[in-house]
Image (tube, grey):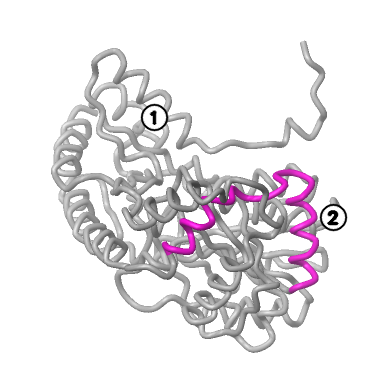
Amino acid sequence: MIKLAERMSRLGTETAFEVLAKAKALEAQGKEIIHLEIGEPDFDTPRNVIDATIKAMQSSQTHYSPAAGVPALRKILAEDMSKRRNIKIEPNQVVVTPGGKPIMFFTILALVNESDEVMYPNPGFPIYESVIDFVGAKSVPYQLREEKEFRFDVEELLSLITDKTKLIILNSPQNPTGGILTKEDLEVVAKVALEKDIYILSDEIYINIIYEGEHQTIAAIPGMQERTIILDGFSKTYAMTGWRLGYGAMPQDLAEKVTQLQINSNSCTCTFAQYGAMEAITGQQDDVVHMVSEFKKRRDVIVDGLNRIEGISCLRPHGAFYVFPNVKELGMDGKEFSNFLLEKYGVAALSGTAFGKYGDGYLRFSYANSVKNIEKALDRIEQAVKAI
């Protein structure tokens, strides 16, 4: 038996991959599974991005790149982020990483000591809590409430802030709820961050998948860009999950330290993939527009369908590609019901508790699947509810 370091006992996981593996095992046994568990667009990477990457490989862009990213890409990203968020970002503030998760990991490693506290949304992306715990800091969840369209209660959030609060993590649009924070929400966080010298990690990976309203970033509030780390990437917007391409924008002195962490772990991000990323940002956006339009249609199908099932209620999310229905009236907890759906009815979903304790009594469905399959899944869910 290997004697692991104690910190390994504090490292969490991402349940979506565990459920995916279980679903694949059932498929291997011949069972038809409708996949609504994984947070991955079911569209292909745009052809122009693939072609640009192939061209880069053929042009010998297959060696190390600078640790913070190819300079031309950092410039493009800085310009794009500045335009989308109405702020000024310089290329030396941008670090390109293999996926968005390293920005979470590196930010927390660079800023947070063991005695510090980090606040994070719950229900929320499970890796937030995992990394906070891993570094030995105290993880402090703030609840996203259904009655507020999965936004936080202002007084409740403020009551959790102490003199040890070093970092607050925001995510909008949100995984798993699809909720969106308002400018008023962000102004509350900004005020306390400025007063108490707190940094913000703003996870904006779903910035381009919004159906109503406009994206708001806390970095645009006066005084906040100097203490905000913006996380973004290519996985969701451009259906590039397997490419492992993410990036962050942050104060320059922090960007230098994050680059140092990159050198100590990954060396750099895949060079030829970065050339594909340049095309993704600067090339045609028709594929993105089409994908978001399709997601909106699917959102309406799944929300309307779930609300027709007795015992289930579901808010209509304004962003991302998830719904987070309330199943408390079914008399079966979320984890038990999600297992029942998968094993007996062939619908793969996640229990709300996969996203934290405040997810109890909910499920998460990803509607990154065809309308035909979503409608088939809804029929099966209704059959499962009647069978309870």
Circle 1: residue type:
Glu
Residue at the image point whose x is 26% and y is 22% from the top: 344
Q: Is residue 138 visible?
A: no
Q: Can you say whether 6 is above or below 183 in the image?
A: above
Residue range corresponding to the magenta coloring? 252-280
Nearer the viewer's eye, disc 2 or disc 1?
A: 2
- Which residue reaches farthest top? 1
Asked if the stretch drawn in magenta spans residue 174, the answer is no
- In front here: 126 or 153? 126
Which residue is the site of mark 1?
336
Mark 2: give few (<14), some (14-19) or many (20+) Cα within 10 Å. some
Residue at the image point whose x is 33% and y is 47% from the top: 366
- In the figure, residue 291 lies in which quadrant? bottom left
Q: Which mark is residue 373?
A: none
- In front here: 299 or 265? 265
Callout 1 secondary element: helix
- In the figure, residue 133 lies in which quadrant? top right
Calculate the distance from the C-alpha at mark 2 to the C-alpha at mark 1.
37 Å
**Relative to residue 214, is residue 143 drawn left or right?**
right
Q: Can you say whether 29 is above or below 135 in the image?
A: above
Callout 2 secondary element: loop
Q: Position of residue 186 (x, y in %)?
A: 56, 77
Which residue is the site of mark 2?
113
Q: Position of residue 213 (x, y in %)?
A: 34, 78
Mark 1: give few (<14), some (14-19) or many (20+) Cα within 10 Å. few
Asked if the stretch drawn in magenta spans residue 268, the answer is yes
Which quadrant does the N terminus fall into?
top right
**Relative to residue 333, is residue 296 drawn left or right?**
left
Q: Main secondary structure of the magenta part?
A: helix
Q: Position of residue 231 (x, y in %)?
A: 58, 63
Residue at the image point whose x is 46% and y is 60% from the top: 174
